[in-house]
Structures are given as structure tokens and as C-alpha cells.
Amino acid sequence: MTGVTGVAHASVAADYEEHRRFLWALCYRMLGSAADAEDVVQDTFVKAMERPARRTGDPIRPWLVKVALNRSRDLLRMRRRREYVGPWLPSPVETGDDSPPAHEPAIDGVAALEGRYDLLESVSFAFLLALEVLTPTQRAVLLLRDVFDYSVRETADALDLSEANVKTTHHRARGAMQAYDGPLRRPSDGAQQSARTALAAFLERLQQHDVRGVEALLAGDVRALTDGGGEYRSALLPIVGRDKVARFFVAVAAVGPGIRARMTMLNGMPAVIVDVPSPGDRLAPRVALTLDVDRDGGISRVYAVSATRKLTALR
């Protein structure tokens, strides 16, 4: 019996190496949380060891996807029942200029699929926040159909839905995404370069405590979202308007000496990771900051994430 168990565990280990990146990629987009995605992937393979669910020769990925999506939908429902302290933001994950997160350098050897949204766009903050208006099932259908190129039949099998239900759910999900699709905030080369220029100027003027200089970089409809998860001090509501956003970040930048900043790419866009060696009372020791720019190069959104569990995917 021990020998049979050892063979089963070896088989699961091989499946883990083959399929974990795909599952993580799907679960991260479902949940917007790198830590939760990792937990779901681990739970899925634990279940595979405890209750193998395939006949010899059957592909295991469809079963793994079904288990992971069921668990992800449960977690989304639980999250939405809990009251979150302040704005909710996705976990930042490090990416290259034109590649998906380091957790998934390619999916099945393909860096970008032919879906409605490619892999890099589908981890952007703008896209992940847009998904928040969808129900868990709508979210799963949209991701499978429009990011991972699943057919209607494959999507129905993965979610235990009828094909008619998949088509209806997909239509409604696309309708709910119209507010996102309108501006087409895709992390193109031009958008990345514009954001890189704006971010460098933003950081320089923060160092100079230049409120008016920061204000001049901001779009008229600028909004800043800060996610401390109730763990660290942050704005509990979105900060709206040039003057308020500029004053908030200039005040935050004056926390003291010894701050270290590292420029990087997070979720497809230029970003900065700030480490504070000796933070004061309820001040975050690490903050990841990224932004969106409008077509005129003005900063339209600023995202600052400091909640510890949100930063687990960063080096």
C-alpha cells in the first residue's frame, strides 16, 4: 500500500510542476491576491493527493481548474461578506515591460494569448479593479473566455454550467466591463513610457515637498486609492482632486530620513517600492506605488499598497 501511495504522490508532484503556473495565473486574476492564489493552488494539489479524481490517461488539468475555480469563487464570496477597511486594491506582482508576472513567464509556452484581453493587460490594476463589479461566476466566465481562450463547452465543464448559461453570463460580464473597455487602459509601450515619465517627475517633486509641482502633474479627475488593510495608516476613502491628492502624498513623503526607493514594473506598469527603515506608529515599513496616466500624460490614478499580506509577491 505504501508503494501505491508513493506512486500517487509522485504523480501529483509531476502534475504540480506541469500545471501550477497556469493555475496560479488563473487564481491570481480571479482573486486579485497573490497570497490567496498561492493558497488555492496548494489546496488544489492537496485535494489531488487526498482524492484523485481521474481515470488513468485522462488529462488532469480540467479537474484541477474546476477545483481551483470553485475554491476561488468561495473565497470571493467570503471576501465580499466581510467589511474591508478602506479601499481594496489588488496585490502588486512584479512584471517585465512586456511580460506577465514572474510567477508565470509563459503559459503553455505562449507569452500572450489571442483573447480579448492579453495576459499582461489582465493583471493591470485597472483591469483587476474593473473585475470587482462582476459576480464570482461572471468573473470566472470572463477570464476563461476572454483571457484564457476557453471555448463555451470548456467553460461550461469547468464551472458546472450549461452552455446557454455560460453564453448569458459572458454577455452580462462583458456588459459590466464596458466602463473599463471604453478608455482601453492597456499597458502598451506608449502608456508605459508615459507613466514612467510621470512617475519620475512625481517622485522628484515629492522629494522637494513641492505641492504645486505635484498638482501640475495630475489630471483633473485624479483619484488616489491607498490600501493599508486596516493594518497601517492610510486614507479610508478615495482621495479625489488635484489639491487633496498632492497634499496627501507630500505629507506622506515627509516621514523621515533613510527612505529607500526601488523603481520596478508592477502589474504591467512602472512603479516604485518604498522601504521605510524606522516607521512611526502604524506607519507602513513598505509601500508599493503605481499609477495610471490619461492620454494627455496626466496622472489619473495613484495606487498605494502597504498591507503586509498584499506584498508577499514582491522581492
Image (cartoon, rainbow, N blue to C red):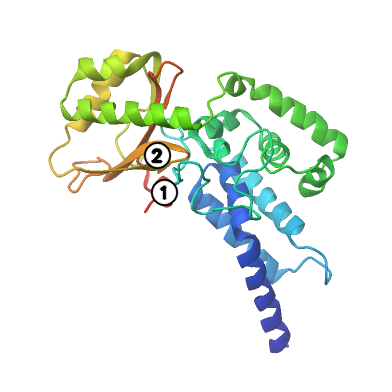
Identify which amino acid the numbered label 2 is placed on.
Gly
Q: Hey, which residue is sitting farthest top in the picture?
A: 220
* Quadrant of residue 256 within the rendered picture: top left
In this view, 290 is above or below 96: above
Residue at horizontal 37 percent and vertical 28 percent from the top: 236
Q: Nearer the viewer, residue 236 or 95?
A: 95
Q: Which mark is residue 229?
A: 2
Q: Which mark is residue 227?
A: none
Residue at horizontal 73 percent and vertical 25 percent from the top: 172
Residue 106, image x and y in percent? 58, 52
- The reply to whether residue 55 is in sight is yes
Residue at horizontal 46 percent and vertical 43 percent from the top: 91
Q: Hey, which residue is sitting farthest left in the picture?
A: 257
Identify which amino acid the numbered label 1 is placed on.
Arg
Q: On the rendered structure, is 165 left or right of 283?
A: right
Residue 99, image x and y in percent? 52, 45
Residue that carries the numbered disc 1 in the rendered image: 309
Q: Tell me if label 1 and label 2 are in contact, CB under 8 Å.
A: yes
Closer mark to the observer between disc 1 and disc 2: 1
In this view, 4 is above or below 26: below
Q: Nearer the viewer, residue 187 or 36?
A: 187
Secondary structure of the residue carrying tag 2 is loop
Q: Nearer the viewer, residue 95 or 226?
A: 95
* Quadrant of residue 4 within the rendered picture: bottom right
User: Which image quadrant: the N terminus?
Assistant: bottom right
> Distance of mark 1 from mark 2, alpha carbons?
9 Å
Disc 2 crowd, CA 10 A, few/some/many (<14, 14-19, 20+): many
Question: Considering only order in the chain, which callout, 2 or 1, is on the residue closer to the N terminus?
Answer: 2
Residue 86, image x and y in percent? 41, 31
Secondary structure of the residue carrying tag 1 is helix
Residue at horizontal 68 percent and vertical 49 percent from the top: 69
Residue 100, image x and y in percent? 53, 46
